Amino acid sequence: MKAFELLDELKVGGTVRHETCDTFKAGNPETELKRVAVCMTATVDVIKKAKEWGADALIVHEPTYYDHMDVKGSDRVTALKEKLICESGIAIFRYHDYMHARDVDQITEGELHFLGLTGEVEPTPHFGSYILRGTETFSAVELAERMEKMLGIRHIRIAGSRDKKTNKIALCFGSPAGVYEILTDESVGIVITGEACEWKLAEYARDADLLGFTKSLIVMGHIPSERDGMKLLAQRLQEKHEDIAFAYIESEEVYTYTDET
């Protein structure tokens, strides 16, 4: 199988109604695949690890060059990263829009899978966001502790209600549009997201809680909120293509903390 054939396969089942970012960012689309690495973000460390492993291609979810469509800047960091990628010889292609555009969003599916959360999942009017009517009831603290334990997230932030329980949880992994509109829905108790505007989202959740509502905002961090979808992708590709080796390479959380040793 060639690299472009795998990308074409990944696009099956999704409908994107705009110019897609799911294109090759580096390398030769005609590359014959023997080893394929999967990651959230093609960081410098990930590129080096992929090359050391012998990857022919790297499937990424987020931009490689700090722009949604990977328009390259003229700065030295971008130039040096591009040089590193070219020297690696690895074909890099993005799987983002089509991953979110399937009937069942694959990122959301992966996060729920590794968290062990079950229930009825319904799409919202906002692309990439869903409502879970769970079979379990959680407080924000209980759910955050579960995320830290099962997903290995270093620090999760909570705004608003800490101990009020609900089974109606909004799944806004990454940083999709419409999080504020979902947060203001009185029937939604907890909103999970990757990134948040504090003066808007966090302050709304805090005031809602102080006014007596069950309203929590859980901020996971962008990479921790989506990487388990990419882990599940690597597993499923390996099951489907036994003649190709697939490996998930961890991008790591972007922030470091004062309690690290």
Image (tube, helix red, strand yellow):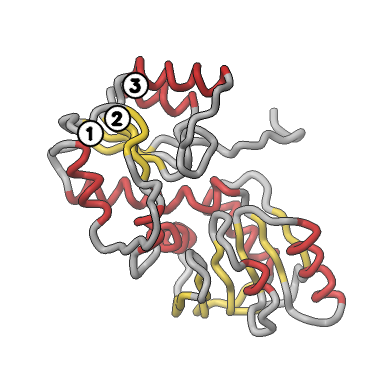
Q: Which numbered disc, 3 or 1, marks the residue closer to the eye?
A: 1
Taking the spot 50% from the left edge, 16% from the top edge, the residue there is 80
Q: Which numbered mark, 2 or 3, is in the foreground of this view?
A: 2
Tell me: 161 left or right of 250. Answer: right
Q: Residue at x 64, y 60 (%)?
A: 144
Residue 91 has which mark? 2
Which amino acid, mark 3?
Lys
Q: Which residue is mark 1?
A: 29
Above or below residue 227? Residue 215 is below
**SS under mark 3:** helix
The kind of residue on which mark 2 rests is Ala
On screen, 57 above or below 86? below
**Residues at discs 2 and 1 in contact (Cβ within 8 Å):** yes
Disc 3 to disc 1, C-alpha distance? 17 Å
Marks 2 and 1, how far apart in space?
A: 7 Å
In the image, residue 198 lies at what x, y percent?
77, 56
Of 6 and 139, the residue lying toward us:
6
Q: Mark 2 or mark 1: which comes first in sequence?
A: 1
Q: Which residue carries the number 3 mark?
A: 51
